[in-house]
Image (tube, grey):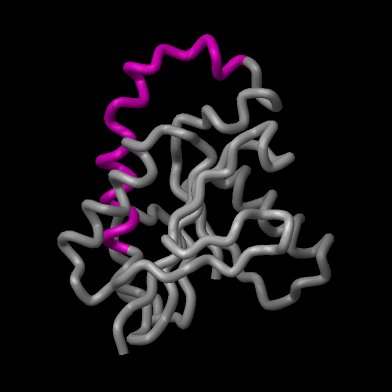
Amino acid sequence: SSFDLYPAKVKLIQQGAKRLGLSVVNARIRDAAHPEEMLPPGDQVLCDVPCSGLGIIRKKPDIRYRDLKQTEDLPELQKKILWNQAGYVKKGGLLLYSTCTLLPRENEQVVQAFLETHPDFFLEALPLPEEFPKNETGMLTLIPGRHDTDGFFISRMRRKP
């Protein structure tokens, strides 16, 4: 299952799945910051949370004109989503947290706060293609110009069995 708060984005998810030939993707409208009683636990849960978007500034140059004060509350929303979605990870399962920003307050600091309050999760090294540096920390920031990508943050956590 895949969820987004906005109908237009759900439509994009559906179109992307169709383009890739993925018939198992079920995209629906849902607020990930609030529990969903009918959602079963999964082996892998990806939280691609709303963020300031500073890592994709070359694709969306208008971001540079945003008032960063408007993004100060994002870590609280990101935490709500991560805390909520962690409840859907089976024991022994993976929880991935991802943003398209380079700000530590939306990345490492959110993950560290999560781990401090969720001792049943731990960071696990990210398996990456050879062109990326070896990762042992379970957290990686991709820097534009250094990794031939936009700016992204990825964290991999496993729930204890």
Above or below: residue 68 compared with residue 33? above
The reply, left or right, for residue 118 in relation to residue 19 is left
Give the percent coordinates (x, y) of residue 41.
39, 81
Residue found at x 65% / y 71% = 25
The reply, left or right, for residue 148 in relation to residue 43 is right
**Quadrant assignment, res 94:** bottom left
- Identify which residue, 20 or 147, lies in the foreground: 147
Which stretch appears magenta? 62-84
The reply, left or right, for residue 39 in relation to residue 145 is left
Give the percent coordinates (x, y) of residue 156.
45, 65
Above or below: residue 32 compared with residue 38? above
The reply, left or right, for residue 134 in relation to residue 81 is right
Magenta stretch: residue 113 in it?
no
Instruction: Look at the image and tell me in which quarter the C terminus lies.
Output: bottom left
Instruction: Look at the image and tell me in which quarter the N terminus lies.
Output: bottom right
Residue found at x 74% / y 63% = 17
**Quadrant assignment, res 77:** top left
Above or below: residue 96 compared with residue 39? above
Residue found at x 52% / y 28% = 54
Magenta stretch: residue 70 in it?
yes
Give the percent coordinates (x, y) of residue 72.
29, 26
Give the percent coordinates (x, y) of residue 118.
20, 67
View extreme (bottom): residue: 161
